[in-house]
Each structure stands twice: as C-alpha cells, then as structure tokens.
Image (tube, helix red, strand yellow):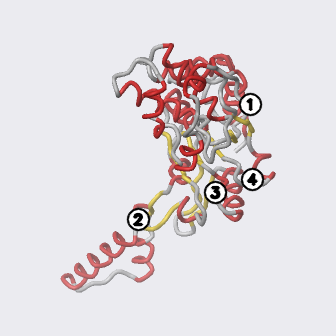
Amino acid sequence: MEDDALPPLIEPEVGPEGVRDALAREGYLADDGLATACFLAIQLHRPLFLEGAPGVGKTEISKALAAWLGAPLIRLQCYEGIDAAQALYDWDFPRQLLHLRSVEAWSSVSGTSPEPEDLERRLYDRRFLVARPLLQALEISPSVLLIDELDRADDDFEAFLLEVLSDFSVTVPEVGTIRAAQPPLVVITSNRTREVHDALKRRCYYYWLTYPTFEREVEILRTRLPRASRRLAEQVTAAVQQLRRSDLTKPPGVAETLDWAQAVLTLGCEELDPDVAARTLGSVLKYQEDQERVAGIDYEQLIGVPVEPG
C-alpha cells in the first residue's frame, strides 16, 4: 500500500502543537520535541521508536495516544525467546479437537463421513485462528500497537518484526494474506539494554526520552495527582531528582515520583518531612542495596533542593 493512499489518522492542520495539547488532555505532558515526533510518525505512517531509561514515560505515551485517537491499545510485551507464533497467531487446538469429535459423533449417527480434504480445510478455518497482538493490530482499524521493550527480544524476532512493519500484512498458509485496511500507529520502546539493529531504526521515527525537568515533573505530578499540593509536588520531585544523581541500581522514574506522592497522601500527610520520607522510601527505591546506599542521607537536603536532571 502506498503511503499517499492511506487515510490520515489526524488532519495535517492539527500540527505538533495540537498533538501536545491533545496528549495533555489525556494527562500526558509531552515537550515540543516529543509532540513533534508523534505528529510526524502519524503523518508519515512510520513507527515511533522511543528509547530512554526505564520510567521516563515511553509506555504511557502509547496509552495517551490511544485514548486521544479513540483507538484500542494492543500491547506486545517482548521478552527473551519470544517468537513469531507468540506475537502473530496460533491455532486453537482444543476447539479443533472438539470440532473433530463432533464430526465423528455426527458421522456415526448419520452413517456418512466428510471428505478428508474438506474436513482438514474446515479444521483450519479462520474461526479456529487465535490472533496474537500483531495480527490483532492488522485486523482492527484504527488501532495503536505498543511493542514494548524490544531490546529484550532476540535478533531473529527483530528481523521478523521488520518484515511485518514493512508491509503491514501477513500470510497465513491455510487462510491467505491478511492486510491492514489502515496500518496501526506503532509505538516501539527500548530501554537500550542492547542496540536495536539499524534496519529497524531506519523504518521508524526515532526519539530519545530523557527525565523531565524539575518544572515539568512537578506539573506532571500535579496533573496526575490533583490532590497533591504544589509544595508536596516540589518536595517529592526535588527528592527524586536528587536520588537520580546518586549511584543507584535502579534510579527512580516518573512512575516512582507519582508513587511516592501517593504514598505520602495515603498516610494523610500534606508535606514530605524527613520522617515521612524515611518511612515511605520503599515507594521510590525498590532495591535493598539502593535503600542501604541512602540510609545515611540528609533528608532535609534531599527534600529541599531542586535540581535539573543530569
């Protein structure tokens, strides 16, 4: 399918500013660079490839895009050993076996049997095909396909994915070729635990996500947790941004910022004082080594000094 022939998901007049505003209405505060990347990925019919540290909002933006476009979000979680069958389709063997037994029962009563070729064709009918995320995304239009943490998958799966994303069609030998009426908006994420091959990157629009600035993270926190006062939002954000500068096994992401503020509010506190910070540290640091590393920290200093991300 030629790109020019594809119906647009959004009108060109929306522009990056319109994308940024629409995402904000869905609770996702994107900066101008990310909003532009989303706009161009949609307009150019390219997958949006997002790399960055865990917790910077790579997965969340696909949810916001789906909500804005009114399209279902279909998620393919990658892991070591994932193969095409787990991502594309499989046959429903229990249902096929049940159908086979029904045919046998009917044959014994009626005294007639179907032709073997006809029976085999019926066993591999479309109704027995179980669509996995990639096939679901091709069959549902429009849709948003999130391919999460691609860096966890093997090289062979990457090559297979490149083939699917090039044509947005698959061929099931028993059924035929299935082609997307309108290709899904694809969002690919990677934590960069390994390099993804250039061939796949060339197919995509690339954007590197960093941790938000202090002001933007405060705004994100207040947008997602309206109950949080500005003072609490600033205290939690300052503390998290200080922790990111420490030598931690797992630096806290934006999700941990929200979790920490939520924990403080759940305790009925309006501010983050040293005592509350020490008691709720488990909501932001999830490794024992990290908690031990900050055991002697000056909480007054941690809470009170806003810093820009490094």
Q: In this figure, which residue is indicated by the disc labeled 2?
A: 128
Kind of residue at badge 3? Arg
Q: Earlier in the sequence, mark 2 or mark 1?
A: 2
> Residue, x 46% and y 38% (percent of image)?
283
Q: In this figure, which residue is indicated by the disc labeled 1?
A: 310
What is the C-alpha distance between the residues marked 3 and 2? Answer: 30 Å
> Residue, x 48% and y 26% (percent of image)?
274
What is the C-alpha distance between the residues marked 4 and 1? Answer: 24 Å
Q: Earlier in the sequence, mark 3 or mark 2?
A: 2
What is the C-alpha distance between the residues marked 4 and 3? Answer: 10 Å
Kind of residue at badge 2? Phe
Kind of residue at badge 4? Val
What is the C-alpha distance between the residues marked 3 and 1? Answer: 26 Å
What is the C-alpha distance between the residues marked 2 and 1? Answer: 53 Å
What is the C-alpha distance between the residues marked 4 and 2? Answer: 34 Å
Q: Earlier in the sequence, mark 4 or mark 2?
A: 2
Query: Which of pointers 2 and 1 indicates the residue nearer the eye?
Result: 1
Query: Which of pointers 3 and 1 indicates the residue nearer the eye?
Result: 1
Against 146, residue 85 (above or below) is below
Q: Earlier in the sequence, mark 4 or mark 1?
A: 4
Choose between 119 and 66: the one closer to the eye: 66
Q: Secondary structure at mark 3?
A: helix
Q: In this figure, which residue is indicated by the disc labeled 3?
A: 152
Q: Secondary structure at mark 1?
A: loop
